[in-house]
Image (tube, helix red, strand yellow):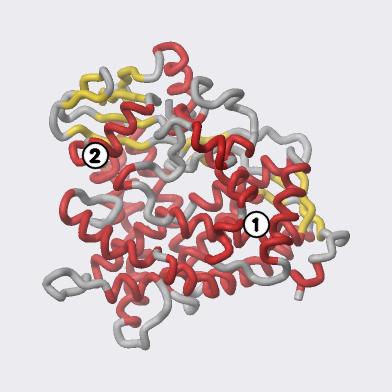
Amino acid sequence: MVSNPVEVLTKYTELYGDTFKFYIGGLKEAIVTTNPDVIQHVLKTNWENYQKSEIQVKRMGHFLGKGLLTTHGEAWRTQRRLIQKGFDRKQLEALSSIMQDSLAESLKGFEREVRAGSVDIYPHLMKMTFSMVARSLFGAKLKDEDIDLVSHTICTVQEFIVRQTLQPYMNPWFGVSGDLRKHEQMRERADSILMSYIKQRRHQEPGNDLLQTLMDARYSDGHGMTDELVLSESMQLLVAGHETSSNALSWMFYLLSTRPDCLERVRQEFDSVIGGAPLSYTDVPRFEFTSQVIQEALRLYPPFWMIDRMAVADDVAGHVAIPSGSTVIVFVYGAHHAPKYWPNPELFDPERFTKENEKLQPPFTYLPFGGGPRGCIGGNYAMLQILMILSILLRKYDFQLAPGQQIEARPMVILRPRHGIRMTFTEAIARDHHAVLQE
């Protein structure tokens, strides 16, 4: 279970059907489900009866403070409404240029690396996407070394939270051994760096970034968020946006390297939609086939492979009795790979997501951004970010998988490539749009 929970839960789903009871870490009973009726009931129909689990609220709250990811009820509702403004069409349009500048900066380092030979694309894409998210939040002045430190902290702390969750019997030892304190000190250092940016901003000209949205937000009594709450929300947005896009992109490069026909169609679509111009948010709806490729990659490798909730009161979902206090695990990866809803589920087939086919898909069998009122707030931002990176990398380079490697998934908080994905990138010369891209 510690090594690969997805494999274990997939095996039990095959043995016991789409809903069964399971003990996490041998201690805590949970109801695991891939049944869309049960999922819809828990995430949407009766969502107020299902809070984020103790794992998320207690463990993540300990490291991330109180914010959108770790609160419930009225406090959550208010924060969600305020933060939503940071992801509306107007704001995403304004963020486009910050994102483009950040990407151009990241590409210089990427270019140097790929000239030297094959690279593991995962850390490179993670650096690109995290830098974009961090600068979207804190503006263009955020220093590279601060971005690296915060990114490293988030990764290390996330791994520790996974260990705390899957090996709950180790928690007393984590306290005694100093392991817990070590991770708390890392977080404190990252917090102090971000807090200094927040305090500086209070005395500066307003910016065009998400930090400004958080600072300008007002509650019904006219008051704004405290610096501490702005920090919590910023850190939680960084965590949520840290690995999701880079993860999806890594798997996309891997999948496209196995399907040259799909790759060519994607390149042609970029040429016809934007030509040599930089991509902006208004272009996003025009990418039909590329969106299908993104959706299919997110089906095969959903960044969040499970969603957990805790029942507040006794309930019945479908024909399943859910006692108060019990944990429900929505096994997203299992739902995305269920042969009942996806013919040949292991096959990479973007045609599943044509408009006609999408209409036939039962609701709550596809959950890359969760579902219901607590679905991902940054889905549109992620889509813009993914398309922006693809628009440059896919057309600037030809790429292929380096031979002799085993590609498999490793379920942490996010479904990562276990051994990375090594690829060789060579500058593409033959395509006529290339000259424009290099200017």
Q: How many marks?
A: 2
Residue type, mark 1 in image: Leu
Bin the neighbour count of mark 1 within 10 Å (Cα to Cα): few under 14, some 14-19, many 20 and up.
Answer: some
Q: Quadrant of residue 255?
A: top right
Residue at 60% x, 55% y: name it.
125
Residue 106: mark in rendering: none
| Quarter of the image with the N terminus in it | top left
Residue at x-position 76% and y-position 34%: 404
The quadrant of the image that shows the C terminus is bottom right
Q: Is residue 350 left or right of residue 414?
A: right
Percent coordinates x, y for residue 408 in the rendering: 60, 33
In the displayed orientation, state which residue is furthest to the top. 15
> Who's the residue at 70% across and 51% down the image?
266
Q: Which numbered disc covers residue 47?
A: 2
Horizontal and vertical percent position of residue 297:
58, 41
Q: Quadrant of residue 215?
A: bottom left
From this viewpoint, is residue 91 visible? yes
Residue type of the residue flagged with mark 2: Trp
Mark closest to the chain's N terminus, 1 or 2? 2
Secondary structure category for the residue under label 2: helix
Q: CA distance from mark 1 to mark 2?
A: 36 Å
